[in-house]
Amino acid sequence: MKILVLINNVPDTTTKIRFTGDNTAFDTTRVQWIINPWDELALTRSVELKEAGAVEQISVANVGAQITEPTLRKALAVGADDAIRIDAEPKDAFFVANQLAEVAKDYDIILAGIEASDYNGSAVGGMLAELLDFNSVSAVSGLNIENGELVINREIDGGSQVLSISTPVVLIVQKGIAKEPRIPAMRGIMMARKKPLNVVAPADADAKTTLVDFTLPPPKAACKMVDEENAKDLVALLHEEAKVL
Amino acid sequence: MSILVYTENWDGKFKKLSFELVSYAAAIAKEMGSSVTALSIGEVADNELNKLGNFGAAKVLNVNDSRYNSFDNRALSMAVASAAQAEDAKVVIFAHTNLGKAIAPRVAIKLDAGLVSGVTELPSNFSPFIVQKKVFTGKSFTNVQVDADVKVLTFSQNSFELVETGGTAEIVAFDPQLGDDIFATSVKETNKVTGKVLLTDAEIVISGGRGMKGPENWAGLEEMADLLKAGLACSRPVSDEGWRPHTEHVGQTGKIIAPNLYFAFGISGAIQHLGGVSSSKVIVAINKDPEAPIFETADYGIVGDVQKVIPQLIEGIKEM
């Protein structure tokens, strides 16, 4: 089995969100970049499966300019065998999925995070599956490979399921796929420097959407405080003033 | 030309979310001089399908076929795309649920459409088509312009008021004519959450954090949830510690929710937690630390000991 993990390079989740150019672009100054949290869990699970002997090779792929390479190196340090960077600014999910389709077709399992923590698109995994005409399963919270067969846990709206599906397949993963993201060890970081990071020229593709501008949520009014001793008053406020009880 | 809305069912029933989607679609149809066709896939009775008419669906395409119960993404997306083509749909709307997020991107590719996921408002403009969505997990919004003839949207629940029109819909059987070989997903086991309010459906959510001090202290929150028919949630440390199941974790990497009322007991309000709950209409925080960041986001707050506050709130709710 060969696994490809899609790696999105996103701002650290504690980043203060600011915009530039009259609110038309995300301000990337002083931003720390990380592996998208769900992609990191997908990668961690892939490494566990490889250590268990169920997977031969793990590749990681990203669509981005050179600034994303430290993130790919980190993925190699966690345990991927090789990395592919498609050298283009990601325009939108359609554009990114079309780029990835060029490098993804020879893998048995493609893992994508359920969303990216920046633009919250939840789109690239599904689009890639469709472009490659692969099966796909979403909201995957568990993956095991038993005698070459995939056993998958997924969340449905209102419960969970255990299922099997044939490869090749795109699995769109969420929390639960691995317990904790794996932190690269010093040995992994040293080895990552020697692992291949292949830079690929982008394919011809258009975007179908454009981000016009950004707005921040309006500032909240001050929090109305109730004394600890009079906590019952809070119920009255929620009932009569906020009208939510 | 029509607006197609995929109305999911849960064991043959629609939820408030399905009706919210139809109301939203009807408002778009009005602006575009079009009409709403709802698509139902699975086994839903006619009297249930009829309810969609009351929220503005002119027509319901009914794919009554138990093979779709396996939620096979490929089969479902083929069914939705063929309905969209049959109806000449210019806008196709899904709920921003696990299922909607799974199939909308596939349908967008099939229809050569532009996709906007997690929309929260009606389009602000129709030519060009511009609609707002949340980005940075609720920390910001963006206006997205769609440069394609067909638009696919996933709609964030609790963003639009239900509008009852009193109308009726024409119910038409629809068969996308898929072979059995398309249905590749083989479900071995299904576990449904029963007897509890689902977190993503709940209008009121009661959530506990590390300040609850331990799993043995959840009885008061459970009692409140029962009294208010609320969903139970928790912060990430609580699920990481195993005090509560990870399905209850709300926050940036857990579930993203938008109830009318969110209670945060003993939750300090880390930015990652707020990302999952900041779209709630009213946030109430109870925390012993007056400097806790949750109070900057909350609408109502009590600085105090959660174990002293909870019994008083329960008493107040019982007297209401």
Image: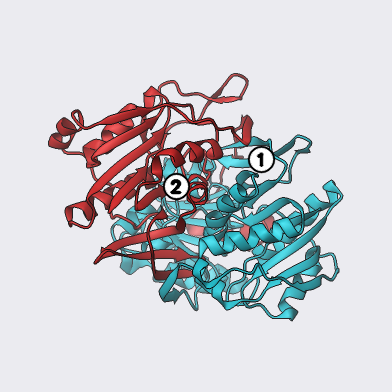
Chain colours: A red, B cyan
- Tell me if B96 is positioned left or right of B224 in this view: right
Quarter residue B221 falls in: bottom left
Q: Residue at x 86, y 68 (%)?
A: B167
Q: Which one is nearer the viewer's eye here, A85 or B38? A: A85
Chain letter for the residue marked with disc 1 in the picture: B
The residue to which callout 1 is attached is B132
Numbered tag placed on residue A122 in the rendering: none
Above or below, comparing residue B209 to residue B64 in the picture:
above
- Tell me if A147 is positioned left or right of B148 in this view: left
Q: Nearer the viewer, mark 2 or mark 1?
A: 1
The image shows residue A154 at horizontal and vertical percentages of 41, 64
Q: Is residue B290 visible?
A: no
Above or below, comparing residue B142 to residue B111 in the picture:
above
Type of amino acid under label 2: Gln
Chain letter for the residue marked with disc 2 in the picture: B
Q: SS at mark 2? A: loop
The residue to which callout 2 is attached is B252
Residue at the left extreme of this rendering: A187
Above or below, comparing residue A65 to residue B298 in the picture:
above
Q: Which one is nearer the viewer's eye here, B303 or B174? A: B174
Q: SS at mark 1? A: strand
